[in-house]
Image (cartoon, grey):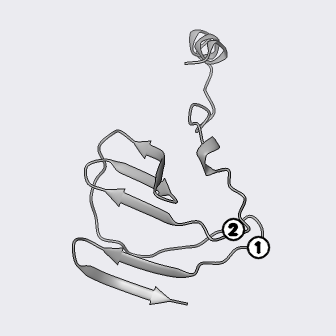
Amino acid sequence: MPQDFKLLKKKKLTIPPGALNDFSAFGFDFINFVKLRIESSEKIKILLNNNLSYKIDHDIIKSKIIGMDYVFEATGTADYVKLSNKKLVFKDEF
């Protein structure tokens, strides 16, 4: 934990949500499509172009997918979506 955050905790101040997370692996030159894959079991792994970019190490609660959103801060596009759990559940090529 960075020294600044230790001081905040000592003074019983709130550490901003996400401040301890390193999202630098998400920095890409988005001229070409980037392959995004999210794997889940008891943990979550997020892979960009088949490289582990982020993981959530604490246990997650499994549930059914009830929807998906694509949110871009600027212009963006999705080429295809595939959801599977050892068998193909959903696939859409735009």
- Whether residues under marks 1 and 2 lie with C-beta atoms below 8 angstroms apart, the answer is yes
**Residue 20's spot in the image, x, y percent?**
57, 31
**Residue 75's spot in the image, x, y percent?**
76, 73
Q: Relative to 77, is 25 above or below?
A: above
| Residue indicated by mark 1 | 75
Q: Relative to 32, is 8 above or below?
A: above
Gap between marks 1 and 2 measured at Cα = 6 Å
Q: Nearer the viewer, residue 22 or 68?
A: 22
Residue projecting furthest to the right: 74
Name the kind of residue labelled 2 in the image. Answer: Phe
Name the kind of residue labelled 1 in the image. Answer: Thr
Q: Nearer the viewer, residue 73 or 66?
A: 73
Task: Kindly identify which numbered label has been placed on residue 12.
Answer: none
Asked whether, in this view, residue 11 is left or right of residue 68, the answer is right
Asked whether, in this view, residue 75 is left or right of residue 21, the answer is right
Taking the spot 69% from the left edge, 68% from the top edge, the residue there is 72
Q: Relative to 30, is 16 above or below?
A: above
**Residue 27's spot in the image, x, y percent?**
67, 50
Q: Quadrant of residue 77?
A: bottom right
Asked whether, in this view, residue 2 is left or right of residue 52, the answer is right
Q: Secondary structure at mark 1?
A: loop
Task: Kindly identify which numbered label has been placed on residue 72.
Answer: 2
The image quadrant where one finds the N terminus is top right
Taking the spot 63% from the left edge, 16% from the top edge, the residue there is 8
